[in-house]
C-alpha cells in the first residue's frame, strides 16, 4: 500500500479518563500541607492549605470527609507524612504513600499548589501506586527495632573507646581475649576501673570456659595506668552500661508488643526444637532462646531453621515486613522490593550499563540478609555449598548477593506457605550439582558426535 493511501487516525486523546473521582492529593511540608480535593462543579481547582499542627490535621480530615473523599495520595516526604497518614487510616480514609520519584518529572512550574493538583489528577486516573507499609502493630514493632538498632550502634562506639583507652595504657586485653565485651573481658575492665592493677588478680577473673589460662592472660595485663586514660575507660564503661540497660528495656517492650499480637492458641506453646544440634547450641550461647520462642509464637514459623538466619535476623525481618506477605504477589515481587534481583536492562539487543540503585527502600532487610549470606561461607549446608560454588566461579561479592536473594526466596516461601525449611545437606547438594554438570557435558559431547565413557574406579 502506498503512503498516499495509508489511513491516518487523526483522533487524539484529549484527557486521561477519571477512574476515581472522589480522591485527593496532598503536598506535604514541615509547616503547611497543600490539599487538592475533587474538582468543584465550576471546574475550578479545589485547593486548601492546612498547617501541620494536630488540630489543623483533624480539620483537614473533616474537610476531606465533607468532600466525600475515599482515598488520599501523598508523597513520602521525610517523616512529615507519618502523623497525617495515621490519622487518615484511623478515620477510614485510604491513604496512599507515593514514591517521590514518580512525581519529580511532572511538567510546568513546580509549586506546592501545582504539586497537590498533579497528585490528585494522577491518583484519580489510577496512575499512582502506594508504597508497602505493614499493619499498625508491625509499624509499632518496627519503630522499636530501628531505635534499638541505633542504640546498638552507639554501644559499639563505646566498645571502641574502651579499646582505645586500654591500648593507650598498653593493657592488651584484645591480645588475651577474643572479645572485651564477653564475660571475662568485662570482668577485667570493671576490675581495672575499680582500682585493681595486679595482672595476676585480674587474670583470676577469667571465666572457666575461656580458652587461655590465667598465666597467658596475665602476661598482657600490665599497663602504664595513666590517670587520663583510666578516666576515659571509666566513662566509656559507664556509657556502655547505660546503653546496655536501654537496649534491654527496648527488647522487653518489643516482646510485649509481639505477645500482644500473638494468637491465643500459640501463647502457651513451646517452640519446636531446632533440628540441628549446632544451631541449637549457637542460639543457647547467644541467649536467644526467649527471642526464638516469642517470634515463633508470633508468626507460627521458625525462620531460624534457614541456615544463616539467627533469632536477631528473624526479628528484624518480622518487624520490618511482618509475617503476612499477601501484599507481594509472588516471590519475584518480594525479591524485587528488596532490591536483590539482578539488573537485566537491554536496549537494541545490548546490555545497558549498570547504574547504582536509586533510593534506599527496604535496605534494612536486604542489608541484614547480605550479612546472613556472609555467615554461610563456611557452613556445611546446601546453602553453604552453593555460596562456595558461586564464589569460586564468580567472586565473593556475587556469592553474597546471590545467597541473599536465595534467603529472601526461602523466607517468602516459609512465611507465605507456613512450611519450615529443611536443609538437604552439603553432600546432597554437591551430588545434585555433579549430576547436573554430567548431564550438560554428556549433551554437549553428543552434539559433537562423542559419547562419555565412565572410567574404572581403580584407575
Image (cartoon, rainbow, N blue to C red):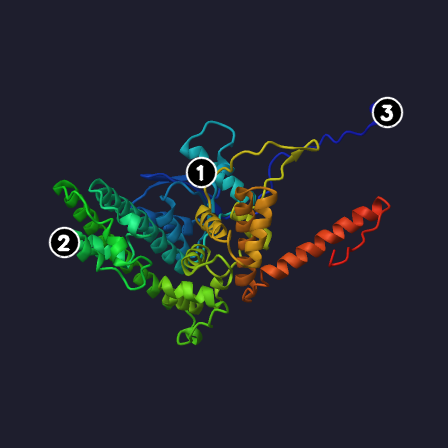
Q: Position of residue 16 (x, y in %)?
A: 60, 39
Quarter of the image where the N terminus is located: top right
Quarter of the image where the C terminus is located: bottom right
Inter-mark Cα distance, 2 to 3: 101 Å
Judge the density around disc 2: few (<14), some (14-19), many (≥20) Cα neighbours within 10 Å.
few
**What residue is drawn where x is 59% and y is 47%?**
390
Nearer-the-camera pick, 127 or 43: 127
Q: Secondary structure at mark 2?
A: loop
Inter-mark Cα distance, 2 to 1: 67 Å
Q: Secondary structure at mark 3?
A: loop
Does 381 appear above or below 353? below
Nearer-the-camera pick, 388 or 331: 388
**What residue is drawn where x is 41% and y is 63%?**
282
Sequence-wise, the earlier of marks 1 and 3 is 3
Is 231 displayed left or right of 90 in the figure?
left
Does 74 appear above or below 210? above
Q: Position of residue 97 (x, y in %)?
A: 46, 46
Nearer-the-camera pick, 103 or 455: 455
Viewer-nearest of discs 2 and 3: 2
Residue 35 falls in image quadrant: top left
Q: Are marks 1 and 3 in contact (CB under 8 Å)?
A: no
The residue beneath circle 2 is 196
| Labelled disc at residue 147 | none
Viewer-nearest of discs 2 and 1: 2
Q: Secondary structure at mark 1?
A: helix
The residue beneath circle 3 is 2
Sequence-wise, the earlier of marks 2 and 1 is 1
The residue beneath circle 1 is 116
Inter-mark Cα distance, 1 to 3: 49 Å
Note whether residue 392 is visible: yes
Identity of the residue furthest to the front in this view = 459
Amino acid at each position: 500500500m502506498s503512503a498516499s493511501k495509508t489511513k491516518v487516525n487523526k483522533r487524539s486523546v484529549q484527557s486521561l479518563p477519571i477512574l476515581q473521582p472522589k480522591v485527593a492529593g496532598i503536598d506535604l511540608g514541615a509547616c503547611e500541607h497543600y490539599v487538592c480535593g475533587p474538582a468543584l462543579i465550576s471546574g475550578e481547582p479545589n485547593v486548601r492549605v492546612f498547617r501541620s499542627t494536630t488540630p489543623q490535621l483533624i480539620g483537614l480530615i473533616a474537610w476531606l470527609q465533607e468532600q466525600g473523599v475515599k482515598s488520599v495520595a501523598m508523597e513520602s516526604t521525610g517523616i512529615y507524612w507519618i502523623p497525617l497518614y495515621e490519622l487518615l487510616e484511623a478515620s477510614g480514609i485510604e491513604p496512599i504513600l507515593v514514591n517521590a520519584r514518580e512525581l519529580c518529572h511532572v511538567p510546568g512550574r513546580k509549586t506546592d499548589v501545582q504539586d497537590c493538583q498533579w497528585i490528585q489528577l494522577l491518583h484519580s486516573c489510577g496512575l499512582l501506586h502506594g508504597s508497602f507499609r505493614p499493619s499498625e502493630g508491625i509499624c509499632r514493632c518496627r519503630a522499636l527495632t530501628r531505635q534499638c538498632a541505633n542504640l546498638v550502634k552507639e554501644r559499639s562506639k563505646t566498645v571502641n573507646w574502651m579499646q582505645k583507652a586500654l591500648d593507650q595504657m598498653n593493657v592488651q586485653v584484645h591480645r588475651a581475649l577474643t572479645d572485651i565485651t564477653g564475660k571475662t573481658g568485662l570482668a577485667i575492665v570493671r576490675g581495672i576501673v575499680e582500682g585493681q592493677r595486679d595482672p595476676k588478680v585480674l587474670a583470676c577473673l577469667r571465666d572457666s570456659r575461656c580458652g587461655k589460662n590465667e598465666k597467658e592472660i596475665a602476661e598482657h595485663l600490665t599497663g602504664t595506668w595513666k590517670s587520663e586514660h583510666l578516666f576515659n575507660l571509666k566513662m566509656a564503661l559507664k556509657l556502655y552500661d547505660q546503653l546496655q540497660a536501654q537496649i534491654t528495656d527496648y527488647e522487653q517492650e518489643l516482646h510485649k508488643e509481639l505477645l500482644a499480637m500473638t494468637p491465643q492458641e500459640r501463647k502457651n506453646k513451646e517452640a519446636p526444637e531446632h533440628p540441628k544440634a549446632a544451631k541449637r547450641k549457637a542460639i543457647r550461647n547467644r541467649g536467644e532462646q526467649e527471642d526464638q520462642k516469642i517470634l515463633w509464637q508470633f508468626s507460627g514459623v521458625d525462620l531460624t531453621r534457614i541456615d544463616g538466619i539467627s533469632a536477631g535476623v528473624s526479628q528484624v525481618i518480622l518487624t520490618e515486613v511482618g509475617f503476612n506477605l499477601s501484599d507481594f504477589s509472588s516471590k519475584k515481587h518480594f525479591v524485587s522490593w528488596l532490591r536483590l534481583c539482578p539488573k537485566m536492562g537491554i536496549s537494541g539487543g545490548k546490555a545497558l550499563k549498570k547504574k547504582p540503585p536509586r533510593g534506599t527502600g527496604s535496605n534494612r532487610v536486604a542489608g541484614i540478609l547480605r550479612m546472613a549470606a556472609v555467615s554461610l561461607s563456611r557452613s556445611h549446608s546446601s546453602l553453604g555449598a552453593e555460596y562456595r560454588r558461586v564464589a569460586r566461579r564468580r567472586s565473593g561479592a556475587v556469592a553474597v548477593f546471590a545467597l541473599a536473594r536465595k534467603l529472601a526466596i526461602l523466607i517468602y516461601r516459609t512465611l507465605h506457605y507456613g512450611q519450615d525449611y529443611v536443609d538437604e545437606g552439603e553432600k546432597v547438594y554437591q551430588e545434585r550439582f555433579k549430576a547436573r554438570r554430567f548431564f550438560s557435558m554428556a549433551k554437549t559431547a553428543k552434539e559433537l558426535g562423542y559419547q562419555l565413557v565412565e572410567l574404572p574406579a581403580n584407575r
